[in-house]
Each structure stands twice: as structure tokens, then as C-alpha cells.
Amino acid sequence: MRPRQLEGPEDALRPALRTLAKRWQRLDAEAKDLTKLIADLVHRATPQLLEPFGIGADTAAKILS
């Protein structure tokens, strides 16, 4: 995916794909960080809410909101 001279439409695709891949990596890392933050907050606020089978951090956070 190294940049090359722009000789045709397919060459313009390379920088666009590279930019999208970098954006996806940043957003994925941000989503993971936020998920961990939510899980930590729910666990601190009401750890008993996470005990029943099928109740994860996302569901518990929604119940608390």
C-alpha cells in the first residue's frame, strides 16, 4: 500500500484505503478504551448487578442510566 505516482483511478484508491484503515484503527482503540471504562465504572458502582448470567457491563450500564 505504499504511495505511488497517480497514473489512474486505482492509484488514487491507495491513499484513501490507507486513511480509512488508520481511522478504523483509532476508532477501534477508542471503542475498546471506552468499553473498559464503562465496565470499570459499573463494577465499582454496582458489582452485584454483574453477577447474574447474561448481564454484561453494557447491559448493566443501560440499567443504571
Image (tube, rainbow, N blue to C red):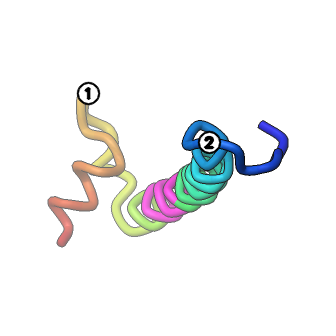
Rendered location of residue 56, percent (x, y): 32, 41
Residue 23, by quadrant, is bottom right
Picture layout, residue 51 above or below residue 40:
above
Instruction: Assign the N terminus to one quadrant of the image.
Output: top right
The three-letter code of the residue at mark 1 reads Phe
**Residue at disc 2, secondary structure:** loop
Q: Residue at x 22, y 49 (%)?
A: 59
Q: Residue at x 67, y 52 (%)?
A: 15
Which residue is tagged 2? Answer: 8
Decide whether residue 39 is among the magenta residues. yes
Please report whichever mark, 1 or 2, sits nearer to the chain's N-terminal start: 2
Q: From mark 1 to mark 2, how far is it between C-alphas?
A: 55 Å
Residue 38, by quadrant, is bottom left
- Mark 2 surroundings: few (<14), some (14-19) or many (≥20) residues within 10 A: few
- Mark 1 surroundings: few (<14), some (14-19) or many (≥20) residues within 10 A: few
Q: Specify the segment rendered in magenta.
A: 31-40
Q: 58 or 11, which lies in front?
A: 11
Picture layout, residue 55 above or below residue 18:
above
Which residue is tagged 1? Answer: 53
Q: Main secondary structure of the magenta part?
A: helix
Decide whether residue 59 is among the magenta residues. no
Rendered location of residue 35, percent (x, y): 47, 55
